[in-house]
Structure formats: structure tokens, C-alpha cells
Image: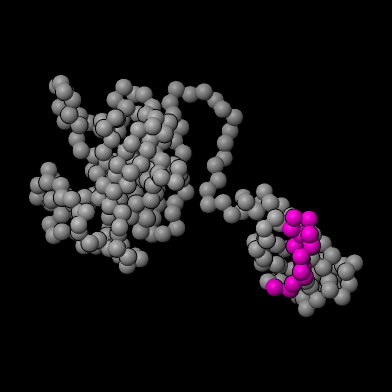
């Protein structure tokens, strides 16, 4: 974490040290990570990682311990600064439909973070239902031909690593997509960052979920009984996510291509 702490005018950088108070005990003084952005002002920048049980940092002049100040550290602020995603909430207002939690974008260009809120064909929110995303190859001349890629070596062109996960087993909890780590999203490799697909095919993800039949926006192939839905296939690339870098993708609204 970065702290900016003022001391008395005339304090020199060479004499500035700090110590952490952790679990009620003062630590060892150190000057590690201390710099002075401007020689005109006795304000010092400290780059330091809080220890376990950190409560506060004290910064002082090693030649004059009466010249000291606290850094203003709080555990709550530290947790907020290190958060990868912050969800701002407002007082609950009843509504007729579910709310979708939109995750933050991943830091890797080749990864797309997929999310969404699903309802079944009766417009009821789905809860506790399994969903599967499978990486497949679609024949360019006959899109009804879908090829299994479980035995095909595929590589992430950004990382140079073999893509091991071809099938993602997910759950729908209160309508929200949820991965095995209980995150309400799943990270998938973008299809335009995958090499090794069979010639004459296009890589897409196949969404299957027996309980919902199809996303709410999916059109019917046939309106006669029994109802038949199109297979839900989608690519994760520049055109579908609208970004040249890694981003987010709402599967429940944009799945069909």
C-alpha cells in the first residue's frame, strides 16, 4: 500500500523511518520504501505491505522521536483498496424482475468473463440448476455439424499454454450464473485467441441447460408441440463482446449468433 505522511518542516529523507503496530505490538523500525516526492515539502511517500494483524503505521524522524505522525491505516480501507470488484448497493426496492450482477473485466486480454441472469420458459427465475459450456468446432459449410474437441490440442495464443478446460460445469443460483468458486461469472478463453482448430471450422461455445430449454431471448425453431429450440452457440471474440481486449459478456442476452 502507498501512504503519504507529512512530518515537521526541515525533516530530511535520510532520517525518516516507520514501524507497524500489529496485534497491539510495535514492530521493528525500517526505512524500506520511503521516498520524498518533493524536496520542498517534508511529506514522505511510503510503499509498504501491512503485516498480519496490522492496526496502524507510525512514521517518525529517527533523530527526533517527537517528530512523528500516523499514516492513517485502517484494515477496512486496506481491504477496499485491494478489492478487484466493488459492488455498490442501494436500499432494497422491490421489482418485478431479477437484478444482474455485472462483474469487473479480467486483466488478461485472452479471457472473457461471462455472466447472466436466466429464467425458464415460464418466465420464472431458475435456481439450483446445472449449466454446461462446451468448446466445440462448427463446420463452416454445414453449421449443423458440431465437432467434439476433447482430444484436439488447442493453444492460447496469448499465453502459449495448452487450453485444458474444454467443458465448464456451472450452476444457476437465483438465476445467476455461478462457477465452482461461487463467483457469479465464469472466465472463458476468447475464441479469437485459440489456435489449433480443425480446418474449415469455427470455434464456438455450446451452452446446454436442460431445465431452462433456452435463454429468454432465444427464438423457437418450431412452434408446434413438442417445442424445439435452436442450439445455443456463441463465439467470444471482438465482434461479440465489442472489445479488442478481454471484457465481459452477458450470456443470457447475447448468446445466439
Q: Which residues are magenta?
A: 18-32
Can you say which quadrant of the picture contains the N terminus?
bottom right
Q: Is residue 233 left or right of residue 54?
A: left
> Is 40 inside the magenta-drawn segment?
no
> Is 30 inside the magenta-drawn segment?
yes
Can you say which quadrant of the picture contains the C terminus?
top left
Among the 4 quarters of the image, the one containing residue 206: top left
- Work out whether residue 251 can be spotted: yes
Farthest residue toward the bottom?
14
**Residue shown at 59%/29% (left/top)?**
91
- Work out whether residue 250 can be spotted: no
**Residue shown at 38%/59% (left/top)?**
109
**Residue shown at 68%/61% (left/top)?**
51
Above or below 158: residue 102? above
Look at the image and name its color scheme.
one colour
| 183 vs 203, nearest the viewer | 183
Q: Is residue 85 left or right of residue 24?
A: left
Among the 4 quarters of the image, the one containing residue 197: bottom left
Provide residue 94's location: percent of width, then percent of height.
52, 23
Above or below 40: residue 146? above
Provide residue 145's location: percent of width, then percent of height.
12, 46
| 186 vs 113, nearest the viewer | 186
Provide residue 161's location: percent of width, then percent of height.
32, 65
Among the 4 quarters of the image, the one containing residue 89: top right
- Label tally: 0
Q: Is residue 14 left or right of residue 98?
A: right
Q: Is residue 197 left or right of residue 86?
A: left
| 50 vs 238, nearest the viewer | 50
Farthest residue toward the left?
141
Provide residue 76's location: percent of width, then percent of height.
67, 48
**Residue shown at 34%/51% (left/top)?**
188
Amino acid at each position: 500500500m502507498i501512504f503519504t505522511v507529512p512530518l515537521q518542516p526541515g525533516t530530511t529523507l535520510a532520517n525518516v523511518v516507520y514501524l507497524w503496530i500489529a496485534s497491539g505490538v510495535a514492530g521493528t523500525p525500517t526505512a524500506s520504501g520511503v521516498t520524498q516526492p518533493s524536496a520542498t515539502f517534508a511529506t514522505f511517500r511510503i510503499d509498504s505491505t501491512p503485516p498480519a494483524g496490522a492496526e496502524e503505521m507510525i512514521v517518525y524522524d529517527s533523530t527526533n522521536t517527537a517528530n512523528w505522525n500516523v499514516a492513517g491505516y485502517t484494515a477496512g480501507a486496506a481491504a477496499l483498496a485491494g478489492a478487484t470488484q466493488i459492488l455498490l448497493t442501494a436500499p432494497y426496492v422491490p421489482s418485478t424482475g431479477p437484478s444482474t450482477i455485472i462483474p469487473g473485466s479480467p486483466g488478461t486480454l485472452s479471457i472473457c468473463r461471462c455472466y447472466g441472469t436466466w429464467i425458464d420458459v415460464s418466465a420464472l427465475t431458475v435456481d439450483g440448476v446445472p449449466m454446461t459450456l462446451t468448446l466445440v468446432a462448427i463446420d463452416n459449410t454445414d453449421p449443423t455439424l458440431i465437432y467434439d474437441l476433447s482430444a484436439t490440442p488447442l493453444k492460447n495464443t496469448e499465453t502459449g499454454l495448452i487450453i485444458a478446460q474444454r467443458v465448464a460445469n456451472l450452476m444457476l443460483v437465483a438465476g445467476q450464473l455461478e462457477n465452482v468458486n461461487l463467483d457469479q461469472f465464469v472466465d472463458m478463453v476468447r475464441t479469437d485467441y485459440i489456435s489449433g482448430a480443425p480446418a474449415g471450422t469455427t470455434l464456438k461455445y455450446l451452452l446446454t441447460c436442460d431445465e431452462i430449454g433456452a435463454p429468454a431471448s432465444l427464438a423457437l425453431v418450431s412452434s408446434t408441440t413438442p417445442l424445439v429450440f435452436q442450439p445455443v452457440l456463441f463465439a467470444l471474440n471482438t465482434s461479440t463482446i465489442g472489445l479488442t481486449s478481454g471484457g465481459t459478456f452477458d450470456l443470457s442476452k447475447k448468446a445466439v449468433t
